[in-house]
Image (cartoon, grey):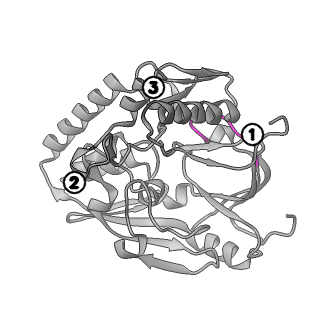
Amino acid sequence: MTNLPSVRGVLTPNRPLNDLTWMRVGGPADWLFQPADADDLAGFLAALDPAVPVFPMGVGSNLIVRDGGLRAVVVRLGRGFNQITVEGTRVTVGAAALDAHVARRAAEAGVDLTFLRTIPGAVGGAVRMNAGCYGSYTADVFVSARAVTRAGQVVTLTAEDLNFRYRQTDLPEGWVLTQATFEGAPGDPQALQARMEDQLAKRDASQPTKDRSAGSTFRNPAGFSSTGRADDVHDLKAWKVIDDAGMRGARRGGAQMSEMHSNFMINTGGATAADLENLGEDVRNKVFQKSGIQLEWEIMRIGEPGADE
C-alpha cells in the first residue's frame, strides 16, 4: 500500500496503535489517517483503492488491537470533529467529541444527556455501539448522524438506517461517522450536574477506573432458561456468571479479570493483546462449562495475531 491519495491531514505509515488504545497493546496499522476535516476525509475515501480496508477508530476505549497489527488504513478523527453545539434540547456534536464532554456541555445548557457522563470513549463509538448505562442508551436520544461512506459519499443516517440493538448497529463496514445529533429532556443544570456526580461516585466505587481496561469485557446475557421454559428466563449480568465460574481475578500473562469488577479485564503491566484475548476466551470457556451460557465479547478485537502466536 504505497500509492495513497494526497491529503491535507496527516497520513502516517506503519503506525503503532498500542498508544492509541486504553489497553495499551497492539501492533501497527499499515496507515493511520487523521483527516483535517470532513471534506478531506471524503476526498481521501473517494480516491482510495476500493480494495483497501478502512477501519474507523475512536479513542480506543473499547478495543483490543492484536499484536500483529492491522492491514488497513485506520481513520482517527481529531480536533476538526469535536465541536459541540446546543439548540434548544438538541445537541449536535462531532464524532470525536468525548461522551463525558458532551454530557457536561449539555447539562450546562439544561439538556439531559447525563448517561453519557460515565461512558468512556467518543460519540462515534457511542453511536456505532449504541452505548448506554443506567438504563439509558444512545438510541433513546438519537436524532440523526452524518457519515462518509467507504466510497467517499456524505450521507445522513436515521435510527431506522442504523437499526439500533443492544451494543450494535448496522453501520456498514468502512463507513466513518463524523457527526451526530441528540435530543435530551430539559432539566435544571444544577440537578443534572448533581446526578452526574452521583453517577461518577457509583462508578468509581464499583469499577477499576484507575486501571488499564476497556470497559465491560462481555455483553450481559440477553436471557437464560435453566429449564427450557419460557417463564424461566432470567436477565443475567456478565459479572455474575463470571463469578459463578470462579473466574474473578483470573490471570493470563499480564492480563487479569479485575478483582473489583469481574467483567472488567485489565492490563496489569506488560500484557500482550494475546494475553488479553486468550484470558477472555478462558473466561468464556469456563462460563460455558459451568452454566451453558455463551458470553459474547463487548470489546472489539481487530487485526492479526503476532508472529509467535
Residue lying at 64% horizontally and 71% vertically, measured from the top left: 40
Q: On the image, numbered disc 3 is attached to which residue? A: 245
* Amino acid at dot 1: Asp
Give 180 or 298, whichever is nearer the viewer. 298
Q: On the image, numbered disc 2 is attached to which residue? A: 109
**Disc 1 to disc 3: CB gap under 8 Å:** no
Residue 188 percent coordinates (x, y): 12, 48
Give whichever of discs 2 and 1 has the lower sequence position: 1
The numbered dot on residue 94 is none
* Amino acid at dot 3: Ala
Give 299 or 2, whichever is nearer the viewer. 299
Residue 242 seen in the figure: yes
Compared with 302, 290 (above or below) is above
Res. 181 image quadrant = bottom left
Residue 104 seen in the figure: no
Q: On the image, numbered disc 1 is attached to which residue? A: 67
Q: Is residue 25 magenta?
A: yes
On-image quarter of the N terminus: bottom right
Q: Is residue 18 left or right of residue 245?
A: right
The kind of secondary structure element at disc 3 is loop
Compared with 194, 181 (above or below) is below
Res. 78 image quadrant = bottom right
* Amino acid at dot 2: Ala
Q: For the view shown, which residue lies furthest in the right direction?
A: 2
Q: Which residues are magenta?
A: 21-28
Residue lying at 54% horizontally and 55% vertically, measured from the top left: 79
